[in-house]
Image (spheres, rainbow, N blue to C red):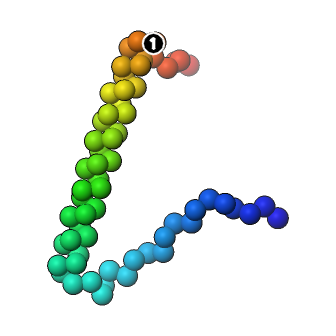
């Protein structure tokens, strides 16, 4: 049998037990993480665009 070494997703969080303040803090943290991801995506797209300009775009079919 082949073992699956991929990380398993974390179990869903029980948010019902959190206070309003805790939920708002969690939302703020997640929004910060989303903003970081969006900035990284923008940088990677710009890098890819610069590389495509220098070396030519990806092959078209």
Q: Quick check: 56 above or below 12? A: above
Q: Quick check: 39 above or below 14? A: above
Left or right of residue 31: residue 8: right
- Give the residue displayed 49% in from the left and 70% down from the top: 10
Q: Is mark 1 on a helix, strand or loop?
A: loop
Badge 1: residue crowd in 10 Å (few <14, some 14–19, many ≥20): few
Q: Quick check: 52 above or below 22? A: above
Quickly name the residue at label 1: 56
Position of residue 48 measured from the top left corner of the image (x, y, whole percent):
40, 26
Position of residue 7 measured from the top left corner of the image (x, y, whole percent):
58, 62
The quadrant where residue 13 appears: bottom left
Q: How many marks?
A: 1
Q: Quick check: 58 above or below 9? A: above
The quadrant where residue 18 appears: bottom left
57 or 6, nearer to the observer:
6
Q: Residue furthest right?
A: 1
- Give the residue displayed 32% in from the left and 34% down from the top: 43
Left or right of residue 12: residue 26: left
Left or right of residue 29: residue 58: right
Q: In which quarter of the image is the C terminus?
A: top right
Q: Quadrant of the N terminus?
A: bottom right
- Give the residue displayed 17% in from the left and 79% down from the top: 21
Position of residue 34 measured from the top left corner of the image (x, y, whole percent):
29, 53
The quadrant where residue 19 appears: bottom left
């Amino acid at each position: 049998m082949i073992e699956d070494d991929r990380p398993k997703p974390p179990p869903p969080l029980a948010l019902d037990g959190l206070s309003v303040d805790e939920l708002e803090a969690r939302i703020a943290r997640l929004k910060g993480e989303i903003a970081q991801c969006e900035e990284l995506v923008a940088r990677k797209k710009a890098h890819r665009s610069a590389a495509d300009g220098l070396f030519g775009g990806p092959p078209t079919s």
